[in-house]
Amino acid sequence: MLFFKLKRIIKLGFSSLVEHKLRSLLTALGIIFGVGSVIAMLAIGEGASHEAREQIRSLGSSNIIIRSVKPTDAGGEVSRMVTYGLTYEDARRIHELYPQVSIQVPARELQMNLRHNGVTVPGRAICTVGWAADSTNFKIIDGRFFDEHDMAREERVAVITRAGANRLFPLEHPIGKQVYIDKFAFSIVGIVENSTRRPAASSKSAKSSSTAEQAANREIYDIYIPLTTARHTFGNVIRIRESGSTRLELVELHQLTVTAPGEAEVLTLANSIRETIRQAHKKPDFEITVPLELLKQAEQTKRIFNIVLGSIAAISLLVGGIGIMNIMLASVTERTREIGIRRARGARRTDIVVQFLTEALLLSFVGGLIGIAMGIGVPKVVTHFAGLITIVQAEAIILAFSISLLIGIVFGIYPAIRAAALSPIDALRHE
């Protein structure tokens, strides 16, 4: 009996809304845009946050990354050599003082040109160890990464990025071919996915090249070589040529990656290692990055970002609720005589409240469904045209839809009570 009664009330509510289609649609627009904007904005925010967190996680949540940094007062005169950064002694000291950690990826960076068959591009030779491919999640596209055997024999082998391979070997398969790093020939043994590339320093000679060549020359192409080979071939002194001059820099290691036994010990170890290196260095020529710390900061930023986005989008839902209240009050005035007739035929005040509350809920329900479709569709459009990662979460859909129904109840209850409070006699006299 209750089911049939409820079915009749819903049918009556639908017929009342359908009778004024345009007015119902305009009333529901606030809910539609509110629900859609909540879902879409949270999806875009979650996508951006997810991408940032994944980049941090790729560094390793148990890792402590120590990098060499050139001090601001180090100068760059040609007349003298600038010495700074991490040393092999730092690596040895960390190994002895903190036996519970493992030093994964020592690395150097050498800014040198890469050359093949008359094509020369600015390059960055990253000198590292054989297990770097496993430790830093390299995506090997073709061939292999150099191994311990290559390092022990100081082989002149190299692994190039996809972008570098496309630039230097546009019509050839790079594996097995030779590429010159400065004036030394290295054999390509593998290709990895592109790494982050930075703008190269411009030179006067670049001004005379074509626009396409200038665009290509602005990229620095990474190439990976064994650390032992680099020490034997290039030594520890880096010669940087800029604008016709040469400056010398002595950097033994550009980066050390230290892995803690567990995440709980990362922050404590990072502070201890920072103090250990600081005592051995007279100047601030290093920096320590803790991915776990960055990850926690990213999570906190994500929470704040979601609260801000959700609050902004919730304003649309509030406006939609005000619109529902406004239209329901107008409906009560228009249907005063109908209310009087129903009361005269035996309808109770509760029945009138349920009827008008059902109509408000139906507006919120239909508007919420359309808003969900809009909230799912907009992120897909953003992903397709802008190339941004978006993640639509089920929690966001449930939250937005629940709030829309709640707003329908909150803003519909006053007009419903007002309708039920009308005197049947006065309502029947209403013209």
Image (cartoon, grey):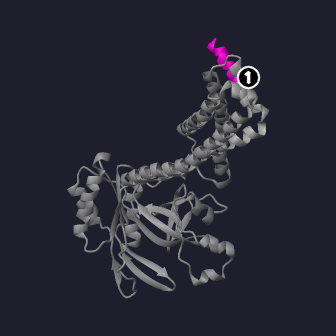
Q: What residue type is labelled 1?
A: Ile
Location of residue 371 (image quadrant): top right
Q: Is residue 89 above or below residue 374?
A: below
Location of residue 421 (image quadrant): top right
For the stretch drawn in magenta, the main secondary structure is helix
Q: Residue 350: within the magenta?
A: no
Coordinates of residue 206 in the picture (x, y in percent):
61, 80
Coordinates of residue 387 in the picture (x, y in percent):
63, 53
Identify the residue shown where x is 42% and y is 63%: 127
Q: In this view, does 253 lie above or below 65?
A: below
Identify the residue shown where x is 24% and y is 63%: 275
Coordinates of residue 348 in the picture (x, y in percent):
63, 20
Residue lying at the far bottom of the rendered structure? 79
Find numbered disc 1 in the image and state the secondary structure of the residue it sits on.
helix
Q: Nearer the viewer, residue 132 or 62?
A: 62
Residue topped by disc 1: 341
59 to the left or right of 397: left
Residue 14 seen in the current view: no
Q: Residue 5: within the magenta?
A: yes
Q: How crowded is mark 1: few (under 14 residues within 10 Å), some or many (20 or more)?
A: some
Residue numbers of the magenta segment: 1-12
Location of residue 162 (image quadrant): bottom right
Q: In this view, does 16 lie above or below 247?
A: above
Coordinates of residue 366 in the picture (x, y in percent):
68, 34
Q: Nearer the viewer, residue 183 or 367?
A: 367
Residue 285 seen in the current view: yes
Identify the residue shown where x is 74% and y is 26%: 428
